[in-house]
Image (cartoon, grey):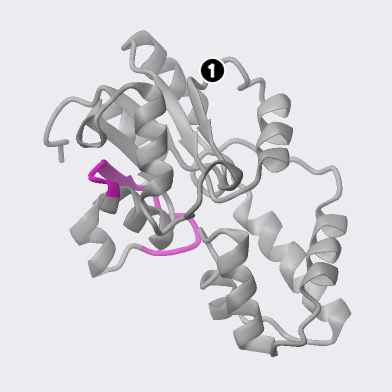
Amino acid sequence: MKLPRKPRAVVFDLDGTLIDSEALVKEAHFAACAELGVTMTDAQFLSLVGLHREANDLQLKGYYGDDFPLEHFIALTRAHVGDRVAPLKAGAVELMDALDEAALPFGLATSSRRPWVERHFAAHRLDTRFRAVVTRQDVNEGKPHPEPYLHASKLLGAEPADVLALEDSYAGVTSAHAAGCMTVMVPDLLLANDDMRAKALVVISLADVRGLI
């Protein structure tokens, strides 16, 4: 397994790729739904993974109706998460160290908003490590649209074709592939299906990415 060319830059997704946050987010979603008297299934939650908030809002209204109290739901999920911070995924630090040693700049392209990014960057001392950070608030279109990866590539000074994108979700892989990036999927809650394997190399963990660079 190898990349078609040596990358000039790397872009990480955040949730489920760089940080192990999806289980915490799932717990918060299920707790909020229970408090509102509705049920969320595993399949419904997985349909939200990797999407930005506006897309998630549409999904939730589709499941629970147009009168579903979205703002209250979001407040409940935030209250459930509280001040907790998700840990880094296994192999993340080692991969970032390897990228530094190889003089490969790296950035972030996430569907999350800046406060969530800043909380985790501060907790894990990542503020000075990333050359570019693209949040949902920095683009007009979120994943699965290619704009997040196009913007991150531009900020890193590399053509998308020379950028290695690391993702865990279907929306993220679709975004990176549509941008023209070399894409690697590191599955978290979502298993790689045939569509994902057609768009990305699939590895088990971030430790496997080190062998590709």
> Residue, x 28% and y 25% (percent of image)?
158
Q: Position of residue 111 (x, y in %)?
A: 55, 51
Q: Residue furthest front?
A: 140
Q: Which residues are magenta?
A: 179-191
Q: Is residue 75 visible?
A: yes
Image coords of residue 69 (percent x, y): 81, 78
Residue in view at x 59 percent, y 76 percent: 58
Q: Residue furthest left?
A: 4
- x and y percentages locating residue 37 in the rendered image: 84, 87
Asked where in the image residue 26 lies, by quadrant, the reply is: bottom right
Q: Secondary structure at mark 1?
A: loop
Residue 181 magenta-highlighted: yes
Q: Amino acid at mark 1?
A: Arg
Seen in the image, is 189 located left or right of residue 98? right
Crowding around mark 1 (Cα neighbors within 10 Å: few <14, some 14 to 19, many 20+) is some
Is residue 205 shown left or right of residue 180? right
Q: In the displayed structure, does residue 144 sit left or right of residue 21?
A: left
Residue nearest the viewer, comparing 162 with 21? 162
Q: Is residue 107 magenta?
A: no
- Tell me which corner region of the image, top left, top right, bottom left or bottom right, holds residue 61: bottom right
Let me know if residue 202 appears in the view.
Answer: no
Residue under label 1: 129
x%, y% of residue 65? 69, 90
Q: Residue at x 41, y 12 (%)?
A: 100
Residue at the spot 23% in from the left edge and 59% down from the top edge:
197
Q: In the figure, 209 relative to 80: above or below?
A: above
Magenta portion: prevailing SS class: loop
